[in-house]
Image: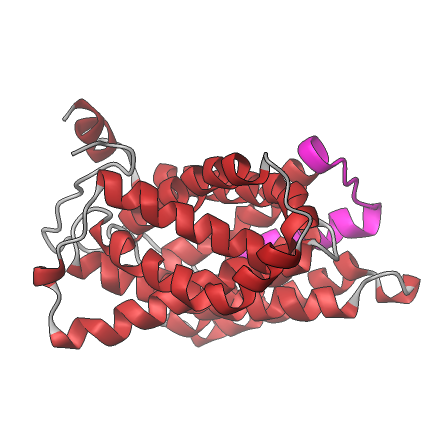
Amino acid sequence: MKARSIVNGLPPWTLAVAAMLAVQLANALSVSVVEQVGAGGTAWLRMSFGVIILWIIARPNFRSIRKQDIPALIVLGVVTGYMTLLFLEAIDRIPLGTAVSIEFLGPLTVAGIMSKNRKALVWPALAIVGVVLLTEPWQGQIDPVGVVFALSAGICWGLYNLLTQHVGDRFSGISGLSLTIPVAALATMPLGLPQLIHGEFTWWVLPAAAGIALITPVIAFGLEMLALRRMTHSAFGTLLSIEPAFGVLIGILILAQMPTWFQVLGIILVISAGAGAQRGGQRESKNLPLTELPLEAK
């Protein structure tokens, strides 16, 4: 109860920022696991351990599911799984900060489309300029396959934000996650299980994947769902503008990936585009209670 009251008193943007840091930390920590069992195997392990952890702390109430809820739950689960898998494929080929910036085009475009101000659509164009500076195509060193994976993850990310708010409105606390992450695990299993079987499996892979799963999807996605229940799509999309900076910071601290000055300028443009896309506010109250913290045991 104490943890719940603390979260109730926090502004929604603090939950979103904590979630962003957790996501990028989990991604950076996943690099060593990807080297052992591939991006698919890592994503599948993260989703599978996420199911175990979530079902321990937030057992799903299947009776609460209505027929009209099923499509959104399935699509959100698939999008969540492949957002993770595709992004891990990207960071296996390109730097973390660059991958996050490219992926950010997805939610940034959603923020522009959802905005009532049609002029907001100019901001994704500015972000594209930033991405060009980040990838430095004139150097001929960027992996185009990694860029495609990051763009594909961005499409999933944009859909994820839309569907997370919808599911979060329907199911209290993180009960929606306990229903969608199992779908994510099933969706990524056809690609993940073969990579896991044929990968260089060592003893530390399982505990490492379990620890990463606790960070993301459990804590990070839970915080995002709680934040999105109290914020507009545009406000959340605008706040996400700082995530590329978090990606660069985590990349420097954990992966020793130092950006060039052109890439720094590109990151600044991407962040500026995200900040300018839409100045939203807090979502209009729908009397939706902010309930369980992701780590609160029942």
Location of residue 249 in the rendering, given as x and y in whole percent from the top left corner = 65, 37
Viewer-side residue, 79 vs 120:
79
- Whether residue 121 is visible: yes
Q: In this view, does 72 lie above or below 260?
A: below
Residue 275 in view of the camera: no
The reply to whether the magenta stretch includes residue 265 is: yes
At 59% from the left and 52% from the top, the residue drawn is 271
Quick check: 59 left or right of 91?
Answer: left
Residue 15 occupies quadrant: top left
Work out which quarter of the rendered image holds the N terminus and state it. top left
Q: Residue 36's spot in the image, x, y percent?
A: 67, 47
Name the magenta segment's main secondary structure. Answer: helix
Residue positioned most to the top = 2
Image quadrant where residue 168 sits? bottom left
Quick one: 272 or 32, which is closer to the camera?
A: 32
Tell me what residue is drawn at x 13 percent, y 51 percent.
Answer: 288
Colour treatment of the image:
secondary structure
Which residue is at the far right? 139
**Which residue is pictured at 74% across the width and 56% down the height?**
94
Counting the numbered discs, the total is 0
Instruction: Give the residue displayed 18% in from the left and 52% down from the top.
Output: 60
Horizontally, is 166 left or right of 156 in the view?
A: left
Q: Position of residue 117 (x, y in %)?
A: 41, 72
Tell me where the magenta segment starts and ends, as one range: 252-274
Q: Which of the two residues, 30 or 2, is positioned nearer the viewer here?
A: 30
Q: Does the magenta stretch include residue 224?
A: no
Residue 87 % position (x, y):
59, 59
The C terminus lies in quadrant: top left
